[in-house]
């Protein structure tokens, strides 16, 4: 199992943001976490990259257990995980090339190997011609593709995407979802949080439904936008 939640709860103050959440993600799976705003989707993703630790229960990701993380383990775990957010979070004063290259550069890769990897990824994402542009010169869809390229540059085993289409119109959203499906076909597990699961074609992913911090069975989900 790549990700395993066992009876996980996380409180903020006295209030449980999530409670009794148990599920697993196998290597190479595509899992959609859906539920209304405030249901606990972002809390779950934050627990996966261990930006936060559970108040109860246990999280295990790529062999790292939330109950026995040593200080250096956080960096080791996060090397295996790529993250994409709703608001892209690109460095505004760096070019597309530099934004994508940065994670490799800080890991100490040689300039030649960084160039090779970044050029290949930008070509794959249809962004080669934009490599010298600054983020504000790009459309929203292009910015999100740059963010996805940055998340994938170090070959993560798991890609986390938190409302990755939240700022995009329907057609551009479809392209971003297609990109995530392509990445998943290449073997990378994907966990995507969205309040609108209809954006992901049924049959292409496993859906988890959250309501008020708890997983509910698909039969209890009324469909449509939640
Ligand atoms: N850092 C935090 N401090 C206090 N409350 C938080 C924090 N993060 C999340 N919450 C609360 O936890 C609940 C779940 O939030 P969140 O995981 O962001 O939901 P979602 O991503 O599904 O919209 C909400 O009630 C939210 O207000
Ligand atoms: Mg959220």
Image (cartoon, rainbow, N blue to C red):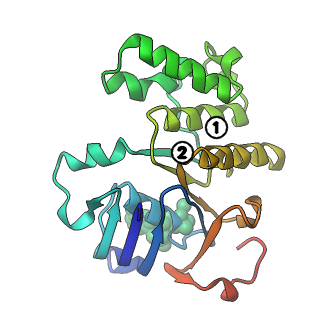
Q: Is residue 130 visible?
A: yes
Residue in view at x 69 percent, y 83 percent: 221
Mark positioned earlier in the residue sequence (2 or 1) = 2
Q: Position of residue 201 (x, y in %)?
A: 77, 61
Spot the residue most to the right. 171
Question: In the rendered structure, are the residues bearing label 2 and label 1 in contact, judged by CB atoms less than 8 Å apart?
Answer: yes
The percent coordinates of residue 94 (x first, y second) are 51, 19
Q: Is the shortest distance between ligand 2 and the CB of mark 1 under 8 Å?
A: no
Which residue is drawn at the image coordinates 43% and 11% (left, top)? 112
- Compared to residue 135, the image places residue 191 above or below, namely below
Residue that label 2 marks: 84
Please indicate whether residue 44 sits to the left or right of residue 86 in the image. Answer: left
Q: Nearer the viewer, residue 208 or 87?
A: 208
Left or right: residue 55 versus residue 39 is left
> In the image, 186: left or right of 199?
left
Residue that label 1 marks: 144
* Mark 2 surroundings: few (<14), some (14-19) or many (≥20) residues within 10 A: many
Q: Residue at left 35%, top 73%?
A: 10
- Does residue 119 sit above or below 146 in this rendering? above
């Amino acid at each position: 199992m790549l990700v395993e939640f066992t009876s996980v709860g996380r409180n903020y103050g006295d209030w449980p943001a999530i409670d009794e959440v148990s599920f697993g993600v196998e290597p190479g799976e595509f899992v959609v976490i859906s539920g209304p705003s405030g249901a606990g989707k972002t809390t779950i993703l934050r627990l996966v990259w261990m930006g936060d630790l559970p108040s109860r229960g246990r999280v295990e990701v790529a062999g790292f257990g939330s109950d026995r993380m040593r200080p250096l383990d956080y960096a080791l775990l996060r090397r295996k995980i790529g993250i994409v957010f709703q608001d892209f979070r690109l460095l505004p004063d760096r070019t597309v090339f530099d934004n994508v290259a940065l994670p490799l550069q800080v890991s100490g890769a040689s300039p030649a190997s960084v160039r090779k990897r970044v050029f290949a990824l930008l070509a794959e994402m249809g962004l080669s011609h934009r490599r010298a542009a600054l983020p504000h010169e790009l459309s929203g869809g292009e910015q999100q593709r740059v963010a996805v390229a940055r998340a994938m540059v170090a070959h993560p085993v798991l890609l986390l995407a938190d409302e990755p289409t939240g700022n995009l119109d329907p057609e551009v959203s479809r392209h971003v979802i297609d990109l995530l499906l392509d990445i998943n076909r290449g073997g990378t597990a994907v966990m995507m949080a969205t309040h609108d699961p209809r954006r992901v074609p049924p049959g292409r992913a496993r859906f988890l439904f959250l309501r008020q911090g708890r997983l509910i069975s698909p039969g209890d989900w009324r469909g449509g936008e939640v």
